[in-house]
Each structure stands twice: as structure tokens, then as C-alpha cells.
Image (cartoon, rainbow, N blue to C red):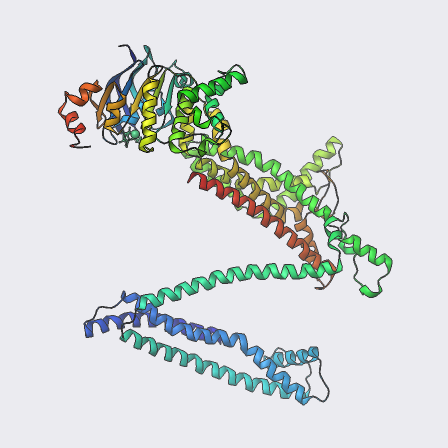
Amino acid sequence: MKNKIKAKGVSVFYGEKQALFDVDLNVAEKQVTALIGPSGCGKSTFLRCLNRMNDVIDICKVSGVIEIDGENIYDKSVDVVQLRERVGMVFQKPNPFPKSIYENVSYGPDIHGIAKDKNHMDEIVENSLKQAALWDEVKDRLDEPGTGLSGGQQQRLCIARAISINPEVILMDEPCSALDPIATAKIETLIDELKSLYTIAIVTHSMSQAARVSQYTGFFHLGKLIEFNTTDKLFKNPDNKMTQDYITGRFG
Amino acid sequence: MNSILLATLVLFAISSFYFGRSKIKKVALVRSIEPKALPKFYGYYQALWCSIPAFLIISFWTFFEPIILKNLIESRIQSMSLNELSKDELNLIYSQIVSFSQGTFTGQISNGIKSGVETYQSLLSVSQGAKIVLFFCAIIIASLFSFNQINKNVHARDSVEKIFTIILFLSSAAAILTTIGIIVSLLFETIQFFTKINPLDFFFGLNWSPQKAFMSDPANMTAQEAKDLREAFGAVPLFAGTAFIAFIAMCVAVPIGLYSGIYLAEYASNKQRKWGKPIIEILAGVPTVVYGFFAALTVGPFFRIIGENLGINVSSESALAAGLVMGVMIIPFVSSLSDDVINAVPQSLREGSYALGATKSETIKKVVFPAALPGIVGSILLAVSRAIGETMIVVMAAGLAANLTINPLEATTTITTQIVMILVGDQEFTSAKTQAAFALGLTLFVLTLILNFIALRIVNKYREKYD
Ligand SMILES: Nc1ncnc2c1ncn2[C@@H]1O[C@H](COP(=O)(O)OP(=O)(O)OP(=O)(O)O)[C@@H](O)[C@H]1O
Ligand SMILES: [Mg+2]
């Protein structure tokens, strides 16, 4: 199995406070890698390192090496805009722009000049919405505001938005935490389908979700990566006592 | 007299507070019962009982004493006089009596008035005596009553809370009633005005020269006078001037205010923001009269000199000078309001955009700004309503000539300026000219009211969306 992303010795500081300690973790290509752990253990922080979203936070300092296809994304020569074009992100709370459904999806292709003409753009929007399993529900009301959709639909819209620029990697930070079980099931199915096209890293609080959707799982605790394994192994027969305690619900 | 009574009352109330407070403690101790509220509530209870009835008596007297005295004296004069006296004559005599008995009257007085003065003074002393007696009775009776109640361990907190509610209610009622009163008086005078001048002539007439309007008896006005009157109060030049100057002001304030708002919200470091925002807001705190003389003495002549050098005729009082300075005054409104609405745009939207590889300026232009737009429009409308109501700057810098012009280099005038012009100096209260000021005032009021209403609706709707 080829590794798409290799993180080596990643440490993160928020001002004085260290949030991640020397994390080594690989994300396999076209697989789903789940990150689990108790609240505040640094899962989101790690995920946000992968597309340099932490750059937005002034006090945040990242050290270590993160390679995508062998290239260190923290190298000075790397253009953040291009990096984020390759590494998309879906957030915990659905955050559609206050624009129409169509414009929400066309936003990315538009700023990167991907679409050749209007027809091409229509095509991209339609494909993205189809891949996000939302097309059938919204095809008649593409002009309506994206904020008017239900929570689950909004989250799928955000997924469509992320895949509209055809990224290589999609990062998802607790994409289902604001959704009900039915919407969650839809998104989980979707993730399973998307992994044939994209490399996916997902943060989740639900162990059952990690077990259902992912092939690899990393367990974080207090900013350290405690165990990284195939999902199967980690949930059935973890190497680490702490992991065992966490997945059996003895703490966290 | 009243001030002494009030001071006494305050002293009584304060000591009542301590008295009530210690009383309940004693009651509780002696009878070993639990007070129904904290001791301080019994203090308030005692103080309120001591002061409110007495205060009501003073207020009642202050309000009704003159009226009653006047009626008594006037009927007395009337009965003494041989022939029927008119209301005005009665008024005159009464005021002579009052001012004489206060020692401020300096003329000769007749015997009749002298006897009136005597009556007046004896009535007054009776009334004052009654007031003082009642005042102290009220304090004593009410205090005894509440003392008794405290003895019975009443629910002091409930009563105190109720009274505070009533006081707060009365204060807000006073504010609202004042507003209503102002509107009603504006309306009243305006209607008077419109009985003399056709509203159509006022709202659509192109000629404003109120000094031409001499109101003679409407019954026998010459045709020329009637025509003059009709043409004196065409307010269109004022509306146009107001709109024009406000427009110039907005041309300055909107771009600068908006860009500085965006800079503050999106680009400025915390430190810059901490310093920059208050400094910009100082602009809003400069008294408008200072802006006014700045416009009249610095900016206006400056434009005139530039104009002279370029061979253009610029009047030293110009719409441009007034508008520019007004624009500077309004910058902080636009900038700090738009800074607020931009800050209210959730961070998650920005992150969503960055995560798609958008740059900062793309994010601001295509996500943040559109999301904040309703709020920004609202803040601009608020600024416009400030601009059209602004008085001092235009009075000092825009001129008085009611020219109907769109040349910014000429003098123009505004609604507010004309109101000031009409009302300074001695005025006949019933003349059409004076009443025109009320009509203008009402128009301005309605305009700003509508603008504010729309603006606040927009801003609030926008807030709800993200809360
Ligand atoms: N912007 C920030 N500024 C300062 N400290 C931060 C910031 N973001 C996160 N932290 C700190 O970094 C640590 C890790 O936070 P992180 O958000 O990565 O946790 P998490 O594992 O995602 O938790 P959760 O499951 O609750 O989302 C926490 O202690 C948190 O307080
Ligand atoms: Mg998190």
C-alpha cells in the first residue's frame, strides 16, 4: 500500500502551549484513515497541519516534516494556495457560503479557473453534487441558498464543494457530529464510495464510525500518537494498553 | 421652600433606611422569628414609605397651587369689577398681583390690585402652611404604618420590588410620552401650516423664499400677495440641497469608512485594531460645531483659492466643502459599524474558503463581503440618516441661498439650515414662516425615521442569521 502523506516528528505549539508531540503518521493512498482520541488530544490540530490551515492562526507554530507525494508541504517553496487545491477539507459544522447551492460548488473551480466555459462549469457542479450524493435532492433548486438546506444536506454540499476542485486528499473533521443518525449513515456510505477516488483522513469521536468507514486508525492521547494500526487490528486486538482502555470505554 | 422640604425628605428617607433595617433585626431577635427578606429590604421599605407619600404631596402642591390660586383670585377680581373683564385683562391683573407680591413689580398699582395682593398673600400663606402640615403628617403616618408592617414581618422584598418596577415603568413612560408629545406638537403646527399653504406647493414648489411671505388677512389678500405666498414655500430646493450634500458626504464616507472597516476587521493586527478603532472613533466625538468652522474657515476658502487659480468660480460657501467635511464626520459610523458586521461573519466561512485554496483577498471579496453586505447596507443607511439630519456643518458652511443646483461649487442650503434660519431671532409664533419650520422638521423627522427603521430591520435580520 502506497503512502500518500507521511508525517514525521510533527510538533505543534499554540503560543507556549504544546498541542502535538512528535507525531509520526502515514496516510495511505485511496484509503480512509481515522483519527480518534479524547477531546482536546490534538486530532483537529494534526488534521489541520495537513493542509496548513493552522497558518491562519497567528500563534500556531508547526515543526517537523509532512510530505505529500514526497514533497514537504512546509517547505518555503510550497504555495499554500496550490497545496489547499490538492488537499480539501470538510469541517465539523457544515459551513456553506451564504450563496446559492450552485455558487457554493462553483466557487472553488471559479477561483482556480478550472472551468473552461459555462457548460463545463455546469458539468463540474453536477458531477460534484452527484459524487456527494446530493444531486437528486437539489437538482431542481440550484438557485436557492445553500444555507436553506438541512444539516445533512449542507454537509454533503460542503463535501461537494471540497471535491469540486478535484483534490487528491480530503480531510474531514468530525463531519457527522452535527448530524442525526440517518444523515450520518448517508455520509458514511458516501465516504466509502469516495475512497476509490480520494485519499481520506477523518477525525471522529465515534468509535463505531471509525470502525465502519476506515482502514487505518490512529489513536491520540494528550497530543501524542499512542497507536497507529489497521482499523481491524486496533479495534480487535490493540497493541497498547491505553488504546484498549479507550476503545472499551474505560476512559475518555 | 420646596428645596428645603425635599432636603428634609432625603434626610428622613436615609435615616428611615437604617431605622427599618435595624428594626427588623430587633424584631427578629426579640420574637425569634425569621425575617421574610434580607434586612436591607426592610430598610428600603421603610425609606420608600417615608418618602413617597410626602413627595407626592409636594408634587401635587407645586402643580396645582398656582392653578387654584389663580382661579380663586380671578373670580374674586371678577366679582369686584363692575364690567365684564376679558381673559387677557384678567391674566394681566393676575400677573401684576403675583409679581408685586414677589417684589418684582416696579410700577404704580391701583387700589384694586392692592387688595388683590393682600388676598393673594393670605391665600398663599394658608396654602403653604397646609402644605407643610400635610407634608409632615404624611411622613409621620406613612412611617408609623410601615413601622407597624415591619413589626408584623411583612414581605418587604415583594413590595420594594414592586415599587422599583413602577418607578422604572414611569421613567420609560415619561420618555415615550415626551416623544409622542414632540411628534404631536410638530404635527399640530404642521397642520396649521398646511391650512395656509397648500401641501402640494410645499412639497413640489421650486422656490424657497419665506422672507417674501407677509401674511395679511387671508380674507382680503390681493392677488399678488396670494401668489407670493404660494411661491414662497416651495421646499424642493431644500430637499435637493439636503440630498445633494448627503450624497457628497456619502461619497467620502462610504469608500473610506468601508475600506478602513475591512482593514480593521480582516488585516489589522490585534495591536493595530486596539489603537486604530478608538482613534477613528474620535472623529465621531468631535463636536459638530468644530467641524462646522473647520469647513467654513479652512476647507471652503481653500477650495475658493484653488478655484481662483484654476479660473473657476467657487463660492466660499459651497456644497462641496460642507459635504466633504460632513463625510469625514461620518467615516467612523460607517467604519466601525462595518467592522462590527464583518467581524460577525463566522470564522468558519473564512476557513471554508481558505480550505478551497482561496487567497485572503478572494475570500474577503467573494465570501466575507457578500455575507456582510446586508449589515453594511444597514450601516450606510444609518449614516445617511445622520447626514441628512446634520445641522451645524451645513449652517456654517453650505450657505443660505436656496439654489436649485447640482453644481457642488455653488452655495446650497438644506432643510436643517433653513429651520435654523427661520427660528433664530424674534418670531411670530403664528406666522406661516415659523410654522414652515415645523413642517420642515416633521418632514425631516419622517425621513430619518423611515431610514432608521429600514436600516435597523436590515441589520437585525442579518444578526439573527448568524446568531
Ligand atoms: N486556536 C487555538 N489556540 C490555542 N490553543 C488551541 C487552539 N486550538 C486548539 N488548541 C489547543 O490544542 C489542543 C488540541 O486541540 P484540538 O482542537 O486539536 O483537539 P481535538 O482532539 O480536536 O479535540 P475535540 O475532539 O474536542 O475536537 C487543545 O488543548 C486545545 O486547547
Ligand atoms: Mg476537534
| For residue A195, above or below residue B328 | above
Asked if residue B146 can be seen in this view, the reply is: yes
Q: Looking at the rendering, which quadrant does residue B227 occupy?
A: bottom right
Q: Position of residue A242 (x, y in %)?
A: 15, 26
From the viewer's side, name the closer residue of B424 and B446.
Answer: B446
Q: Position of residue A172 (x, y in %)?
A: 33, 24
Q: Quadrant of ligand 1?
A: top left
| For residue A204, above or below residue B166 | above
- Position of A106 with respect to B212 (left or right) is left
Q: Looking at the rendering, which quadrant does residue A223 occupy?
A: top left
Asked if residue B361 can be seen in this view, the reply is: no
Q: Looking at the rendering, which quadrant does residue B296 occupy?
A: top right
From the viewer's side, name the closer residue of B189 and B209.
Answer: B189
Which residue corresponds to the image point at 50% horizontal and 42% vertical from the top-left?
B459
Q: Quadrant of the C terminus of chain A?
A: top left
Which residue corresponds to the image point at 44% horizontal and 37% vertical from the top-left?
B344
Q: Position of residue A140 (x, y in %)?
A: 49, 27
- Position of B147 with respect to A139 (left or right) is left
Q: Residue furthest left?
A: A241
Q: Position of residue B242 (x, y in %)?
A: 67, 45
Which residue corresponds to the image point at 18% horizontal and 28% vertical from the top-left?
A247
From the viewer's side, name the closer residue of B211 and B225.
Answer: B225
Q: Quadrant of the N terminus of chain A?
A: top left
| For residue B170, above or below residue A247 | below
Q: How many marks?
A: 0
